[in-house]
């Protein structure tokens, strides 16, 4: 697998990275050994850039995959922590959970419009941890065009992890929907400023997998993007992306990557709206009975809504 420089950081990463969330409890909830085997398979295939997060609860899979091996992947984690102490705890949790003294990349997770100023304490913690040598690079993940644009001028930010796909699914501009070209312009500004860029949601949470190669053609053609994070839930998923990257995939081939499903069990839903606060895509709404319902045309199947439901009414399969 081709290695690329991640912006002006000293890190070199594989052109394709593995998003580890699908194997964890927010999505497939695979047994430890099974999930770790998928991570190990990716590493064996040269995919050595791994994305995880405090919210995903997937550190154990990575630790298990690396046990007794010589692999030295670049690992990126992130946290939703709003303040200094919460972020410091998140960093220590990652170091312990991954059994690593130094984390390669740590991000403010899911920055929305206006969020950065509210989480300056957490940003200060990332800067302090970097100064102490606990983290090599810091940055943000976001679905928002305006956030991506604004972070380009933040000199302490080393890397940016934005959402981008050819259809613009999931891209936000303020509180409204954004489009792919506007997001690309913001990403270009970050790239010009020396930020490392790795992209998420190339398949729009599964909505674009019917055009698998078109989605990859789009993202791979963008010179402003260093690496592409793709969530893998099986070794077959990895084989398919390797085939594409090596140019051996038949032009008319579409992998069996059926869209994941999220449903709301109405008998358990309390109508509290907690899930809606987590959804950046505005895919959840109250139906006529005052219960949560999912707009599948907007849903990115990220699974962020399920863990926060107090009555466990949201099920992913």
Image (cartoon, helix red, strand yellow):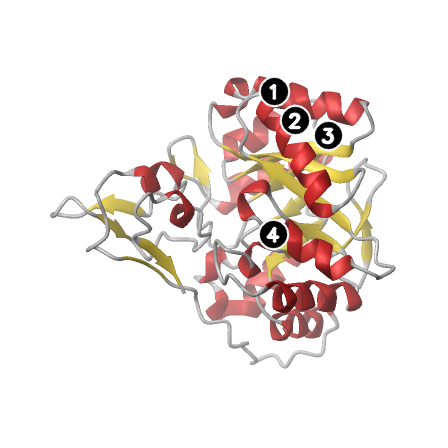
Mark 4 → mark 3, Cα distance in angstroms: 32 Å
The residue that disc 2 covers is 88
Could one spot residue 138 in this view of the protein?
A: yes
**157 or 287: nearer the viewer:** 287
First reached walking from the N terminus: tag 2 or tag 3: 2
Check disc 1 and report its element: helix, strand or loop.
helix
Mark 3 → mark 1, Cα distance in angstroms: 26 Å
The residue that disc 3 covers is 193
The residue that disc 4 covers is 58
Dividing the picture into quarters, in which one does residue 183 lie?
top right
For the image shown, how many numbered marks are present on the structure? 4
Residue 75: where, in percent of width, then height?
73, 47
First reached walking from the N terminus: tag 4 or tag 1: 4
Which residue: 51% across, 46% down? 180
First reached walking from the N terminus: tag 4 or tag 2: 4
Q: In which quarter of the image is the C terminus?
A: bottom left
The residue that disc 1 covers is 84
First reached walking from the N terminus: tag 4 or tag 3: 4
Which residue: 73% across, 30% down? 193
Image: 145 above or below 17: above
Residue 192: where, in percent of width, then height?
72, 33
In screen coordinates, is 52 left or right of 49? left
Mark 4 → mark 2, Cα distance in angstroms: 19 Å
Check disc 3 and report its element: helix, strand or loop.
loop
Check disc 4 and report its element: helix, strand or loop.
loop
């Amino acid at each position: 697998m081709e290695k690329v420089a991640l912006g002006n950081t000293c890190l070199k990463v594989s052109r394709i990275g593995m998003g580890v969330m699908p194997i964890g409890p927010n999505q497939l909830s695979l047994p430890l050994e099974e999930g770790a085997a998928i991570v190990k398979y990716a590493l064996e295939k040269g995919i050595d850039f791994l994305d995880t997060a405090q919210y995903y609860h997937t550190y154990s899979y990575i630790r298990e995959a690396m046990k007794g091996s010589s692999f030295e992947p670049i690992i990126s984690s992130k946290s939703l922590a709003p303040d200094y102490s919460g972020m410091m705890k998140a960093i220590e949790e990652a170091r312990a959970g991954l059994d690593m003294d130094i984390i390669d990349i740590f991000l403010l997770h899911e920055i929305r419009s206006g969020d950065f100023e509210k989480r300056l304490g957490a940003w200060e913690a990332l800067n302090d941890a970097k100064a102490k040598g606990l983290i090599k690079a810091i940055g943000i993940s976001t679905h928002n065009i305006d956030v991506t644009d604004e972070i380009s001028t933040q000199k302490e930010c080393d890397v940016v992890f934005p959402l981008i796909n050819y259809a613009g699914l999931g891209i936000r501009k303020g509180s409204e929907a954004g489009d792919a070209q506007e997001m690309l312009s913001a990403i270009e500004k970050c790239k010009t400023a020396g930020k490392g860029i790795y992209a998420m949601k190339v398949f729009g949470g599964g909505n674009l997998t019917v055009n698998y190669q078109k989605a990859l053609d789009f993202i791979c053609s963008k010179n402003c993007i260093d690496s592409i994070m793709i969530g893998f839930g099986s070794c077959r998923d990895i084989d398919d992306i390797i085939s594409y990257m090596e140019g051996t995939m038949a032009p008319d081939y579409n992998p069996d990557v059926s869209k994941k499903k999220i449903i709301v069990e109405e008998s358990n839903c309390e109508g509290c709206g907690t899930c809606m606060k987590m959804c950046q895509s505005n895919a959840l709404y109250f139906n006529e009975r005052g219960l949560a319902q999912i707009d599948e045309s907007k849903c990115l199947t990220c699974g962020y809504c399920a863990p926060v439901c107090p009555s466990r009414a949201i099920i992913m399969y």
